[in-house]
């Protein structure tokens, strides 16, 4: 791999680029301290701040994906995630699962509700149809699927409407290993005020009630 290829790769991995640049700055600062102590200390301090920032951004991103915690940092595309609307009831399908007919960025889509899935996942075809935005940090994660472990690219769903529930700015993964299935995971469900199953019906109760959508589930 030549220098231009390395630079292109780092341009697509901003957190890695920040960490590597910070390490270089720390090394330069350490070298300067022998001849110019004040300047060397200042440069090294900047490098340490860069490393700290890269670490905190990585932790914040992981927390957004795996918990209901929400860290917003608009300059890097990490906007607030929200779920609002009115109570929505989803009857159990004949296959024993809960399927939701939704609109993703205005495009009709069908989602399987999977409480065992950490992340909301979208098939490549559905992601392309809905023109999902790639995650600003260009992060990817490894997912275990029926076909083995696959690399899935992080993306953002600007708006996902399910009956009278509307979710905005939700993190998702575009997973090539899930076929044509789209999955609603716990990173979305955990942002509801509550959800439960009664008499073979999934009941979604969001925060911040608003006018109901006419979409069917």
Image: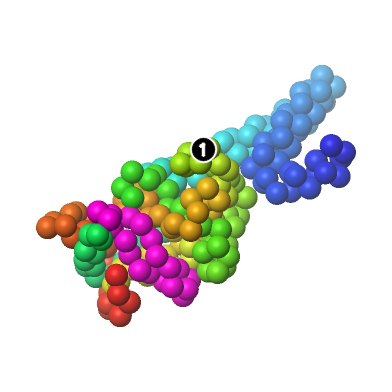
Q: Is residue 96 magenta?
A: yes
Q: Residue furthest front?
A: 94
Magenta stretch?
95-113
Q: Quadrant of the C terminus?
A: bottom left
Q: Is residue 200 above or below residue 64?
A: below
Characterize the magenta stretch by its predominant secondary structure: strand
Q: Residue furthest top?
A: 34
Mark 1 crowd level (few <14, some 14–19, many ≥20, 10 Å Cα): few
Residue 108 rendering spot, x and y as whole percentages: 43, 73
Q: Is residue 44 above or below residue 70?
A: above
Q: Is residue 25 above or below residue 204?
A: above
Q: Is residue 27 magenta?
A: no
The residue that appears at 80% across and 28% down in the rendered structure is 28
Res. 40 in view: no
Between 104 and 50, the one nearer to me in the picture: 104
Q: Residue furthest left?
A: 199
With 8 as the anchor, is 84 left or right in this view? left
The residue that appears at 44% across and 57% down in the rendered structure is 181
Residue designated by label 1 = 148
């Amino acid at each position: 791999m030549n220098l231009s290829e390395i630079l292109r790769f780092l341009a697509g991995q901003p957190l890695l680029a920040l960490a590597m640049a910070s390490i270089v700055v720390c090394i330069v600062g350490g070298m300067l301290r022998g001849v110019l102590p004040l300047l060397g200390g200042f440069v090294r301090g900047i490098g340490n701040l860069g490393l700290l920032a890269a670490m905190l951004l990585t932790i914040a991103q992981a927390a957004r994906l795996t918990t209901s915690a929400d860290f917003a940092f608009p300059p890097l595309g990490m906007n607030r995630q929200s779920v609002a609307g009115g109570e929505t009831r989803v009857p159990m399908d004949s296959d024993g699962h809960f399927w939701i007919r939704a609109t993703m960025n205005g495009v009709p889509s069908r989602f399987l509700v999977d409480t065992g899935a950490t992340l909301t996942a979208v098939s490549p075809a559905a992601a392309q149809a809905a023109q999902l935005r790639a995650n600003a940090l260009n992060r990817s994660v490894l997912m275990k699927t029926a076909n083995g472990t696959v690399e899935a690219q992080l993306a953002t769903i600007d708006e996902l409407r399910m009956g009278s529930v509307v979710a905005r700015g939700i993190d998702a993964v575009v997973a090539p290993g899930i076929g044509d299935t789209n999955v609603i995971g716990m990173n979305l469900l955990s942002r509801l005020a509550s959800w439960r199953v009664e008499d073979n019906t999934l009941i979604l109760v969001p925060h911040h009630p608003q006018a109901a959508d006419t979409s069917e589930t």
